[in-house]
Amino acid sequence: MKLRIQKLLASIGIDSRRHIEEMVADGRVVVNGKKVRRSPVIIDDETDTVELDGVLVYAPDKRSIKKQKAAGPVVIALNKPEKVVCTNVAQGEQLRAIDLLPPGFQTRVYPIGRLDAESRGLLLLTNDGELTNQLTHPKYGVTKTYRAIIDGRVTGEVIQQLMDGIWLAEKEGGKGFKVKASKVEFVKRLMDKSVIDITLDEGRNRQIRRMLARVGHKVRTLTRTRFGPLDLNKMKLKPGESRLLTPRELEMLRRAVRDTSALPNQIGKLAAEPSSGAGKVRPKGPMKAKGPMKAKGPMAAKAPNALKGPKPARPNRGWPAKGPEGGRRGLFAEKGASHQLENAGPMAHPLGASEELPEE
């Protein structure tokens, strides 16, 4: 059966598909005696052989895909100690994560993601390539939380910098990229060190150590405490101990996978629905012109022109009226004879002319 090389090697526990693609690009993979660098690389699992860094890792008579599939999916939780590497390819005297599994465990598994040799904590191992891709690819949004003990006193400004983003550069080529923490929580502050929890939704090589170094803090210890919904403290695994995930834990892990690629399809489906009430999404495009509004109630009996025409004059509501010369007559309109006020003396006329009111 023919299939891509990253799927073949991932299924036999060499590494994740993404890391195998990087190995091919770096020229570390040899197929049938020839070095391959350009993807895609198609392998026939019944005839082809594969070498990685000069070590034979696949041969048809060594491990077949059919046997691997018959073993069924397996997910293991391991509390990785320091000085343990997350690779299945032997590198001298280094201790590998798979070397910590029970001796009688026969299924070939590989780490889901990586922890550098100096880091410790929760590490998952599996033989399920699809699950590995879902738990490591950023688009699925599965978070990992790390507890870091660092030199110096962390301030709120530093925490904000980590969440806003830090610019890093690739070792080869110097290409810059921006990384940030999705969540940073302050745990403890001592005289010469601080303890913080950092949550990431994507991971690059030594990302947390490099981010904290850029803001002036060296990492003393780094421990992964959570992987999605799985909590290392609740598992109660001592360093170096491992166990299979329970069916409930495995179901929680699969539910944590958030496929954001499905969101545009859901939005398009909602946009296609007609708008007929609350909670509906109005379809895009120009709005259609509506016809004339129909009057309801008592106004429906009136003729159309009854609503039009000049507005009637507003009645005088006690405000000063204009006099013959354009001025104001006063605050009170005259009724018949002149106003007569008892005990009133001369009074200033509103127009400015003075006149005396007649006596009774």
Image (spheres, helix red, strand yellow):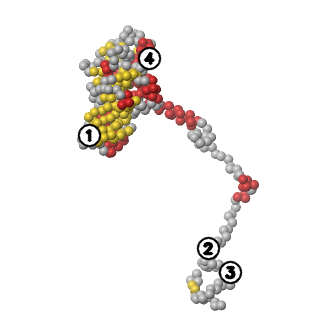
Q: Looking at the image, which is closer to me, 314 or 35?
A: 314
Q: CA distance from mark 3 to mark 2?
A: 15 Å
| Tag nearer the camera, 4 or 3 | 4
Q: Is residue 231 above or below residue 282?
A: above
- Amino acid on which the number 1 mark rests in the picture: Lys
Q: Is residue 119 above or below residue 6?
A: below
Q: CA distance from mark 2 to mark 4?
A: 94 Å
| Tag nearer the camera, 1 or 2 | 1
Label 3 residue SS: loop
* Picture quadrant where residue 49 is located: top left
**Residue at image coords 57%, 40%:** 279
- Label 4 belongs to which residue? 72
Q: CA distance from mark 1 to mark 2?
A: 79 Å
Q: Answer with mark 4 or mark 1, whichever residue precedes in sequence.
A: 4
Q: CA distance from mark 4 to mark 3?
A: 108 Å
- Amino acid on which the number 4 mark rests in the picture: Gly
Count residues near mark 2 (Cα–Cα under 10 Å), then give few for <14, some for 14-19, many for 20+. few
Q: Where is residue 76 drawn, in percent x and y?
A: 38, 22
Count residues near mark 4 (Cα–Cα under 10 Å), then give few for <14, some for 14-19, many for 20+. few
- Label 3 belongs to which residue? 335
Q: Looking at the image, which is closer to me, 200 or 270?
A: 200
Label disc, if present, on residue 319 of the rendered structure: 2
Label 4 residue SS: loop
* Picture quadrant where residue 176 is located: top left
Q: CA distance from mark 4 to mark 1?
A: 46 Å
Q: Where is residue 74 drawn, in percent x and y?
A: 41, 20
Q: Where is residue 175 drawn, in percent x and y?
A: 32, 33
Label 1 residue SS: strand
Quarter occupied by the N terminus: top left
Label disc, if present, on residue 193 of the rendered structure: 1
- Amino acid on which the number 3 mark rests in the picture: Lys
Q: Answer with mark 1 or mark 2, whichever residue precedes in sequence.
A: 1
